[in-house]
Amino acid sequence: MVTRRTCEAARHSTLQRLSAMTLTFFLSCCPLLARRAGASKALVLGTITQASGAHFNAASASAGGTVYDGDMLSTEADGALQFRGNSSMIYLAGSTSVILHRVANGTQALLRNGTAVVSARRATDMEIVGDGAAIRPLADVPTIAQITISGPKELQIYARRGALQFSYRSESATLQEGSSYRILLDPQEPSTVPKSQSGPTPSGHKNKLFKIIIATAAAGLITSIAVRDVSGSPESPDHP
């Protein structure tokens, strides 16, 4: 015969087992939660310091927003956005979008369209990738550059301060400070003249995989914005 005291004892024992199971579950989850929190901090790339008519992934962007690995930043036609990393900055002009990733010792910005102005202190701080081509500072000196995707397989690059290293697939070239370049990727120009007889190209440099045309002036530069270099002092892209 089951008594009331026996039922209460059984109920109490069941509650104790449930409490023990719950405690074990939470204790086992705590290290996992701690690791996830630590991993999130490791993926932080920087913050948004300026935003107007801009977007952060699918939401509206605002100053102070934290940017993580894989986030997309974009601007409307009359918008602007500025991102600051540890020792680099990137400014997006209107109708521009980038996807940011962490790479060894720095940030990689995949330029999907539009114009970006970048500022970096070291060669590894910032790398811009557009149409498969990579642009980064040539040396560990303060560098400011403007990169524009101007058409299919066509880039406009202005090495405003410091020289740049341009790489596309297996070939690379140096872009000198103070010069503006128009670069054609995979140029489809058949040549019937043997290379030994063709001579140099007066207007620029031509590789098998890309053609560099040196512009006489830095056309289409952003002149109505202020870009802060990595030392924190305000600079304009058209500063002499």
Image (tube, rainbow, N blue to C red):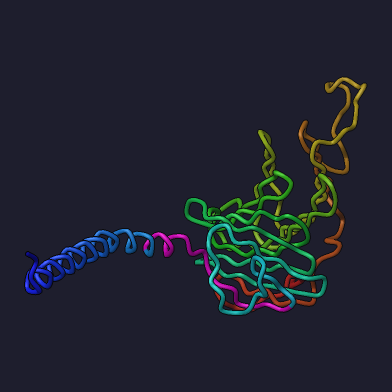
Question: Which quarter of the picture shows residue 189?
Answer: top right
Magenta residues, as a range? 38-52
Q: How many marks?
A: 0
Question: Which quarter of the picture shows residue 174?
Answer: top right
Q: Residue at x 84, y 36 (%)?
A: 187
Query: In the image, is residue 11 part of the stretch drawn in magenta?
Result: no
Q: Quadrant of the C terminus?
A: bottom right
38 vs 213, left or right, is left
Give the percent coordinates (x, y) of residue 90: 64, 66
Q: Residue at x 53, y 63 (%)?
A: 68
Q: Residue at x 86, y 29 (%)?
A: 199
Which residue is most to the front? 1
Q: Residue at x 74, y 72 (%)?
A: 239
Which residue is most to the right? 192
66 vs 197, left or right, is left
Residue closer to the observer: 183 or 238: 183
Residue closer to the observer: 96 or 177: 96
Dominant SS in magenta: strand
182 vs 137, left or right, is right
Query: In the image, is residue 50 part of the stretch drawn in magenta?
Result: yes
14 vs 122, left or right, is left
Give the percent coordinates (x, y) of residue 225: 74, 76
Give the percent coordinates (x, y) of residue 78: 81, 75
Q: Height in image: 128 above or below 196?
A: below
Residue closer to the observer: 5 or 137: 5
Q: Quadrant of the N terminus?
A: bottom left
